[in-house]
Amino acid sequence: MASFAQFGNDLYTGARSFNFVGRRKIWYAIAAVMIIASIVGPAIRGGFVFGIEFRGGSEFQVSQIAADGATSVERQDLATATVEGVVTDASPHVTTVGDDGVRVQTDQLDPDTSDEVRAALADAYGVELGSVTASFIGPSWGADITGAAIRALIIFVILAAIVMALYFRTWKMSVAAIIALIHDIVITAGVYGILGFEITPSAVIGFLTILGYSLYDTVVVFDKIRENTSEDGSESSRTFAESVNLAVNQTLVRSINTGVVAALPVAAILFIGAAVLGAGTLRDIALSLLVGILIGTYSTIFIAAPLYSQLRENEPELQKRSTKVATARSTSTSGAVR
């Protein structure tokens, strides 16, 4: 613990430093590779898999299943086999609901076929026909949900950009933060597409939640950057890029700690929800949160801060200061050699 505390203290004072800003081309290249993979990967798999709420379809819910010692996975396999026994190309998606229920989602079925599936599920689980409900979600409703999600995302990004520009009194910080935010969303969505996970309303909730987390982490780092750079006058011994890099190092331990503390319980929810309970809703929201937290922590350090520095380094005043610092260091080195 003492060594870690010393490590954090060294980062804060500048005794130890990682050159995040100076190596930004490396981080940009890594980000570009991940973004390309997030776009190409799902395309190779045939696109994203959307839940019934977005694409429309039929849904069956079996309740009051007797406790027979079967695991969640066994119950899900039974439902899949039962539905495919009636409709071979139904593409069922099965999740458990509580301790005595199963939900089955399929492509759109006609009324007669739906009745056959209801009867088959009732027989397979040994329940009354009334314990198996059937419902239908039309594609128009799914389109409305999709439109609402997209509008919510656009409105959030616009409002966040405006608020950050007003708070930091510079549009360049706002642009850097929003670019990092888009980076987070693209990669998180790409993970869903590559792994073949369904994008459900729960996943969308997770996406919107990580927007707030990513911006929170970025704002904390940017606040330290503003503090450092505002203290730099014309006689500062640091360049603008060095002040930004110092701020990132000073908040590095805090960013890592926050990311780990946030990721651990979400990872536990993901494991329990998917592996133990077989609860699709928990899995959907936890996966988006976990990926978003990890990517959000990464993007704040390696994308947002270096990008902001790059956006401002070409300003005439900052270029003059960089030249002055370089000249002073060169003169100091020459004097030392003599």
Image (cartoon, helix red, strand yellow):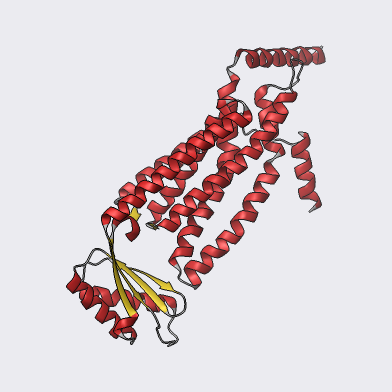
Q: In this view, does 338 lie above or below 29?
A: above
Q: In which quarter of the image is residue 153?
A: top left
Where is residue 288 drawn, in percent x and y?
48, 54
Quadrant location of the N terminus? bottom right
58 vs 161, left or right, is left
Name which residue lies at 60% across and 61% down: 265
Where is residue 42 drawn, in percent x and y?
35, 49
122 vs 207, left or right, is left
Name which residue lies at 43% across and 39% down: 154
Q: In which quarter of the image is residue 122?
A: bottom left
Residue 14 seen in this snapshot: yes
Name which residue lies at 37% across and 57% down: 196
Q: In this view, does 120 lie above or below 200?
A: below
Where is residue 56 drawn, in percent x and y?
28, 59
Where is residue 229 drawn, in percent x and y?
70, 25
**How many numbered callouts?**
0
